[in-house]
């Protein structure tokens, strides 16, 4: 295996220490992905340089000139504190004719604009919950075609930011309260969609043109109260004690017929291509009791922590964590960006 100069790009507050000793579980959770990736790449024999950035693209140019990376391993999820700016950073890497891992700028832009992504999916006749958007500063009005319950979330934020059990609303008052919450707390427009009762599924996809769909993963709520909405809230994703309280666990989905599984695999490939994704992504789905599958959203460059859903699913498909990271690097080196075609 060729040894590479790998520059690992991340937020400046997430540059990990060399060791885990002396750090609490909560501290480690903040930069676990960065720690796992940096140390695994080193174990693979690559020359690794972590680079933390916040709002200065000059840091990327200086690192390019001084380190001369073969590949940028992109773990950056925001720039200047704005989540949807990550595609600008990747565009800058392309302008500098740099190889990078993960999704291309177009795919990041389309996937992060959730209303636009849903319109594209609807155009391709890919089933997704019906939706409407209430812009910041606009009065909350529900179109007559929509019925409760509805799910209210940010139109652009990821990692379940702003999502809680209160996000599932069942009347006009709850809808208005939650829309105002999203406007005020996230500073984004509110995306309101039909709430789909069903199983919470996650499906990883790896590839640029030739796609590999990983085993279907499921989030289980072993201790959830009867009647409570089974959704991946922000606390469920990031609060370890809350996870234990609700008995949250993820594992390979079972009890899905081959017909439905084949449909899920086909659907995920269609979504990946419709949104111009590349590298690797995780698709969030809901599976209703009647076997109908709804695409909730696409997440390019998902969590790559060792032991998390994407890596666990990849292991079931035969990729060790080391092999997964190496595969992602290979895809980055082979991605046909426009500058390579000129």
Image (cartoon, helix red, strand yellow):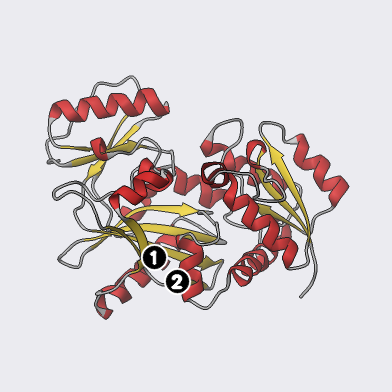
Q: Classify residue 271 by image quadrant.
A: bottom left
State whether residue 116 appears in this view: no
In the image, 300: left or right of 5? left
In the figure, is residue 95 to the left or right of 28? Answer: right
- Against 40, residue 213 (above or below) is below
Secondary structure under the numbered disc 1 in the rendered image: helix
Quadrant showing the C terminus:
bottom right
As drawn, is 106 to the left or to the right of 158?
right
Instruction: Name the residue rendered at 63%, 66% in the picture.
Output: 331
Q: Tell me whether circle 1 and circle 2 mark residues in contact (CB < 8 Å).
A: yes
In the displayed structure, 68 sits above or below 270; it is: above
Which residue lies at the image location 37% right of the left edge and 22% below the top edge? 184
* Of marks 1 and 2, the one in the foreground: 2
* Label 2, residues with CA under 10 Å away: few <14, some 14-19, many ≥20: many
Residue 135 is situated, as x and y percent measured from the top left of the image, at 33, 27
Q: Residue at x 51, y 64 (%)?
A: 311
Give the residue at mark 2. Answer: 213
Q: Earlier in the sequence, mark 1 or mark 2?
A: 2
Residue 321, picture quadrant: bottom right
Where residue 88 appears, as percent x and y from the top left, is 61, 40
Q: Is residue 6 visible?
A: yes
Mark identifier at residue 268? 1
Q: Position of residue 289 (x, y in %)?
A: 16, 64
> From what the image shows, is residue 160 above or below residue 48?
above
Q: CA distance from mark 1 to mark 2?
A: 8 Å
């Amino acid at each position: 295996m060729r040894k590479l100069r790998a520059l690992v790009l991340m937020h400046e507050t997430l540059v990990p220490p060399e060791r885990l000793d002396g750090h609490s579980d909560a501290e480690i959770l903040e930069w676990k992905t960065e720690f796992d990736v940096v140390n695994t790449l080193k174990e693979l024999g690559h020359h690794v340089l972590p680079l933390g950035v916040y709002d200065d693209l000059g840091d990327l140019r200086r690192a390019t000139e001084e380190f001369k990376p073969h590949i940028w391993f992109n773990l950056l999820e925001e720039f200047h504190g704005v989540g949807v700016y990550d595609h600008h950073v990747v565009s800058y890497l392309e302008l500098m004719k740099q190889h990078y891992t993960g999704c291309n700028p177009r795919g990041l832009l389309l996937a992060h604009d959730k209303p636009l992504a849903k319109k594209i999916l609807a155009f391709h006749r890919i089933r997704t919950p019906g939706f409407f958007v209430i812009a910041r500063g606009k009065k909350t009005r529900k179109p007559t075609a929509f019925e409760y319950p509805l799910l209210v979330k940010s139109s652009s934020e990821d990692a379940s930011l702003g999502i809680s059990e209160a996000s599932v609303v069942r009347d006009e008052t709850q809808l208005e309260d939650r829309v105002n919450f999203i406007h005020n707390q996230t500073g984004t427009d509110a995306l309101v969609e039909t709430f789909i009762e069903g199983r919470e599924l996650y499906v990883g996809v790896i590839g640029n043109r030739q796609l590999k769909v990983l085993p279907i993963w499921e989030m289980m709520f072993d201790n959830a109260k009867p009647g409570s909405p089974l959704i991946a809230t922000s606390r469920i994703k990031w609060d370890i004690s809350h996870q234990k309280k609700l008995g949250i666990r993820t594992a390979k989905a079972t009890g899905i017929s081959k017909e439905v599984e084949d449909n899920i695999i086909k659907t995920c490939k269609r979504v990946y291509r419709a949104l111009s994704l590349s590298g690797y992504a995780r698709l969030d789905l809901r599976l209703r009791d009647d076997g109908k599958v709804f695409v909730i959203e696409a997440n390019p460059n998902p969590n790559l922590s060792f032991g998390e859903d994407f890596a666990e699913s990849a292991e079931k498909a035969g990729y060790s964590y080391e092999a997964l990271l190496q595969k992602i690097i290979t895809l980055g080196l082979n991605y046909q960006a426009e500058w390579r075609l000129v």
